[in-house]
Image: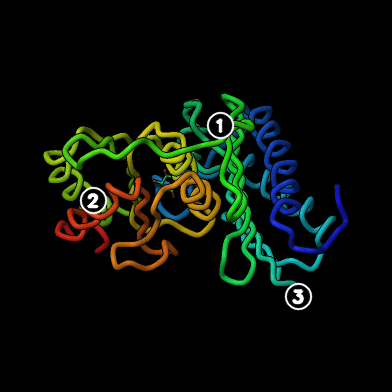
Amino acid sequence: MSTDVDPDPEKLADLAVELATAAGHRVVELADTARATASTKSTATDPVTDADRVAEAMITDGLLSVRPDDSIVGEEGASHQGGTAVTWHIDPIDGTTNYVYGIPAFSVSIAAEVGDQVVAGVVFNPSVDELYRATIGAGSTCNGERLRVRPATELATALVATGFGYTAPRRRHQGRVIAELLGRIRDIRRFGSAALDLCAVATGRVDAYYELGLNRWDLAAGALIASEAGASVGNLDGGPPLDGFLLAAGPELFGPLRSALRELGADRE
Ligand code: IPD
């Protein structure tokens, strides 16, 4: 590992690749035991496993051993206040429900933010050995192949991924929105990992993805991967996709889909 503390995005991405692949492989090794002992956190539908905690500790320890003065925020509680401009956002298993059920669509997501800008993002799906990587201004790749969003499509023929939160009132609202949207688009997909949904926009496996209520650790790496593949990424008010509402789509589709989602109140609780 490098001991350079200069926040060069490529070096930050190299470090994230090393830690995400190691953590992803460990998560797969731990699957049988972790699934058997899974518990829940924010609600009865929000699972967590020992593998989430082991992977987050591996990543945190790895970051601190190389860059002890950076800040860290992780889904399972990792929190370190450092003195550099770099903050790492870690989701050790994004798609924990899939992990618990043995569905091969979960990922390790690591992003490096400098100031308020995400400059490097890595998402690793260990089940299919797909490693997504982006650095700001330098494009995004999957296993080294350059990514590009799908060619333009109209709203009526768009394949749109989405996800649902963990509280019943939010889900009911999200269900009402999707019920109406479904009549205006080609179809929907619900893969179960926001980070992989954003990578699916980047690879062109879907035309768009939106979700209400994501956390920074869910979206930071994937949003950079999608935008570096040519997607427009933002909220419904023209702002950045922070911790409220995120829409990612090809530039031509973004406007019509944003209008439809605004009309349906998709960014409200
Ligand atoms: C969840 C997944 C899911 C999304 C949820 C997220 P987690 O993350 O990304 O696809 O719909 O909103 O919370 O809990 O598996 O890390």
**Secondary structure of the residue carrying numbered label 2:** helix
Residue receiving disc 3: 83
- Mark 3 vs mark 2: in front: 2
Q: Is residue 107 left or right of residue 184?
A: right
Which residue: 55% across, 51% down? 221
Which residue: 49% across, 31% down? 105
Which residue: 37% across, 68% down? 239
The residue type indicated by label 2 comes to Leu
- Mark 2 vs mark 1: in front: 2
Indicate the position of residue 220 as horizontal and vertical percent values. Answer: 53, 55
For the residues marked 2 and 1, what is the alpha-carbon distance in whole angstroms? 37 Å
Quadrant of residue 69 within the rendered picture: bottom right
Indicate the position of residue 262 as horizontal and vertical percent values. Answer: 20, 60
Q: Is residue 40 left or right of residue 236?
A: right
Counting residues from the start of the chain, the first of labels 3 and 2 encountered is 3
Q: Are marks 1 and 3 in contact (CB under 8 Å)?
A: no
Front residue (pair 84, 227):
227
Q: Label 1 CB, ligand 1: below 8 Å?
A: no
Q: Residues within 10 Å of mark 3 (few under 14, many from 20)?
A: few
Asked whether the viewer can see residue 92, the reply is: no
For the residues marked 1 and 3, what is the alpha-carbon distance in whole angstroms? 37 Å
The residue type indicated by label 1 comes to Arg
Residue receiving disc 2: 257
Q: Residues within 10 Å of mark 2 (few under 14, many from 20)?
A: many
Counting residues from the start of the chain, the first of labels 2 and 1 encountered is 1
Residue receiving disc 1: 35
